[in-house]
Amino acid sequence: MAKSFGKITAVPKSMLMDEVGGIDITFHIDRKHAGLMRREWQDIREALNQDRPNIRLCFEEWRNSRSLEQNNLMWALLDLMATAMQKSGMALDSWDCYLACLSKYGARPQYIECLKEAVPALRKMWREIVEVEDRKGGKTVLLKCFPGSSTYDTVEMSHLIDGIFAELDAHGIANADAEYWREEYGYDKTHPSA
């Protein structure tokens, strides 16, 4: 059975509670997910009829994914950073700057301890990995693993962009070009859903 997503669009008008304290709640599945839900409903009914209630509902706060404007702004700023770094003699491109900023300002890092031999395989699974420390006499290593910004919501992406602006300031790169990009994309760092 696959995962289905729906959005609760209104507070239920009624909630039924049975004699032992169980609650029945009805909620709405968005139209774009309704087809998938109709297909899965048969599996759900079969599982319940066979006394196999192996269905889990999870309620999470909905957060919008990062916008294309945020992504474009991030890459414009990283290009600006890379150009300035190259002029100062550093052989960095915008991807190198992205990975450096991701490892410093990235969201949702996961800490993983693994055998040193497993590091190359993990590097293929994560956008950026920072080796934190050797452990167990050098047999294992603790890694700080970051997902890519394409998985970020608007708040996480705003934090990353704020970090990039801070890096530009720290390297004396914050100038009219950086402000141009801020205005071009209407980015207001005080607004987390920019």
Image (spheres, rainbow, N blue to C red):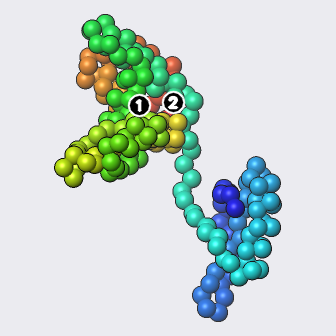
Amino acid marked by disc 2: Gln
Query: Which element carries disc 1, helix, strand or loop?
Result: helix
In the depicted structure, whether residue 96 falls above or below residue 119: above
Question: Would you name the residue on which mark 1 appears?
Answer: 161
Which corner quadrant holds the N terminus? bottom right
Q: Nearer the viewer, residue 119 or 55?
A: 119
Task: Give the residue drawn at x 57%, y 30%.
Answer: 68
User: Does residue 90 appear anywhere in the picture?
Assistant: yes
Of the pair 133 and 109, the residue shown nearer to us: 133
Name the residue located 34 percent from the left edge and 29 percent from the top edge: 100
Q: Could you tell me if residue 182 is visible in this image?
A: no
Q: Do the residues labelled 1 and 2 touch (CB within 8 Å)?
A: yes
Q: Is residue 189 left or right of residue 116?
A: right
Indicate the position of residue 192 as horizontal and vertical percent values: 45, 40
The image quadrant of residue 117 is top left
Q: Name the residue under label 2.
A: 70
Nearer-N-terminus badge (1/2):
2
Residue at screen point 27% across, 9% down: 88
